[in-house]
Image: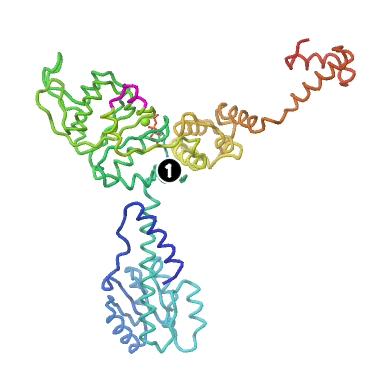
Amino acid sequence: MDIRYSIFINKLEKQLSAYGDREGIIPVPTASIDLLIVDDEEIALKNLERIMHKEGYQVVTESSGERAFELLKVRRFDVVLTDLLLGSIDGLELMAEAKKKDAETEVIIITGHGSVDGAIEATKKGAFHYLQKPIRPDEVRSIVRQAVEKRRLARRVRDLEQKIGADFPDIIGNCPKIVSIKNLIRQISDSDANVLITGESGTGKELAARAIHQTSRRHEKRFLAVNCASLTEELLANELFGHEKDAYTGATQAKAGLLESAHEGTVFLDEVGDMSAAMQAKILRVVQEKELMRVGATTAIAVDIRIISATNKDLKALCAAGIFRQDLYFRLNVISMHLPSLSERIEDIPLLAAFFLKQSAKRAEKDIRGFSDQALSLLTTYGYPGNIRELENIIERAVALAKTELIKAEDLPHDLKDFHAFTFRRRTGNMKTLEEIEREYIQWVLGQVGHNKSEASKVLGIDRVSLYRKLKRTVFEE
Ligand SMILES: Nc1ncnc2c1ncn2[C@@H]1O[C@H](COP(=O)(O)OP(=O)(O)OP(=O)(O)O)[C@@H](O)[C@H]1O
Ligand SMILES: [Mg+2]
């Protein structure tokens, strides 16, 4: 086995087992491996077929290069063993065709005595190995096994890479904190436990909640997002719990609430810290007893919901202050997830900016390729109090304003430029600006000449009007 492959696969296996995939390497049964042998020498062909058949592979033989070529157009093989010289079509053309159908097909080239050059050429072009006639059974067995192993590993690598990389295409970011968030989402995909997501506004709490739902066994059922701060107490109760007929004036029919409609699904309680005490008690019952009461009802209805809550407040502090129920807090916070603010993950800004640019440009039907250096520098130094949502809005605005195929500094809001200037001054805080030095020098000269401005302007080499102007600009007393 290729040592680099085995190191690589080991690494991927380790990464994957961290996500809870303990499936490891499953040996592929040889019977499921398809082998094509092509040789115009009937005896050699029969021999090879016998040896490979004994190894347990599914063997197809072909004595004509043309027919093999036609076959490779329609059928993929795991390994192809082919003679190099086959009349009008050669082994290299077969190799190209086989790899066109499936790039991971391994090809072993067989050469007659003395045609080593052609065989070396073949390996340079991607053949797995070459064998010289007369073929030794042991050798061909070993080479084919290695080729099968390489193909199996290549497939495994692809599967693992897909599992690792292609997950959560909506959650952009490679910084360690985001990678651990993605890992955590994978790790809890089998779990039904409630999750509490904390993080500043706009850090992607809802996005993470949706990803948790999507990877859970509940993904085919509803994901119901409820903003606990947006509705009045009464409306919220009515919406969430539904009501019985005649529960209040105007309730002419019984109505199921949203929580019932999310049975076997996930409920996302956004801004959970803003929930009233009465609502907290009602939700506690749902979480604890797995049942709810419609408004005006006398009997409870069983519901199976998983709750993901989110807040940008310090729920623990709210508990300590008696504003949030501690028993509910513990029930909701079985798994905690904290989303970093954008300023804690500045390395992801270019990636996120590019992602939003692509989205916005597509929506606006504009052909915008990227950012000017200056624009990118402004984007990466800004502080983003509104986090990712703010970045998203900035890019959308810039796309609307952009006149060229690049987003320029002038397409970005003033906030970014001011912030840049501010941080620059802070970074270079112990260095004086020219204006400051000029001001101090003028003051010094004035002191030396007893505050006589005519004298001072002579020393400074400027006329009195200029001196007056400078004095006005600086905030000196005249
Ligand atoms: N990692 C990310 N990759 C791509 N887009 C993201 C990412 N995180 C957040 N977003 C986008 O940023 C916006 C804000 O995200 P989201 O609504 O999930 O934040 P939030 O934490 O729930 O904010 P709030 O507390 O204000 O409700 C959304 O449009 C979301 O798609
Ligand atoms: Mg939100």
Residue at point 44%, 74% (across, down):
127
The percent position of residue 380, horizontal first and vertical second, equals: 55, 37
Looking at the image, residue 326 sits to the left or right of residue 462; the answer is left
Above or below, 446 relative to 182: above
The percent position of residue 195, horizontal first and vertical second, equals: 30, 37
Looking at the image, residue 473 sits to the left or right of residue 406; the answer is right
Above or below, 282 relative to 190: above
Q: Nearer the viewer, residue 32 or 338?
A: 338
Image quadrant containing the N terminus: bottom left
The percent position of residue 88, horizontal first and vertical second, equals: 43, 80
Q: Is residue 320 magenta?
A: yes
Q: Nearer the viewer, residue 75 or 219?
A: 219
Q: Nearer the viewer, residue 304 or 155?
A: 304
Q: Mark 1, residues whose alpha carbon is within 10 Å: few (<14), some, or many (≥20)?
A: some
Look at label 1 and name its amino acid: Ile
Residue at point 37%, 54% (across, down):
162
Q: Is residue 454 magenta?
A: no
SS type, badge 1:
helix
Above or below, 227 relative to 74: above
Q: Which residue is mark 1?
A: 178
Q: Is mark 1 within 8 Å of ligand 1?
A: yes
Above or below, 354 relative to 232: below
User: Residue 292's image quarter?
Assistant: top left
The percent position of residue 110, horizontal first and vertical second, equals: 42, 82
Pick out the residue farthest to the top: 478
* Image region (quadrant) for ligand 1: top left
Describe the colour scheme in one phrase. Answer: rainbow
Magenta residues (range): 317-325
Pick out the residue farthest to the front: 320
User: Residue 50's image quarter?
Assistant: bottom left
Q: Nearer the viewer, residue 397 or 227?
A: 227
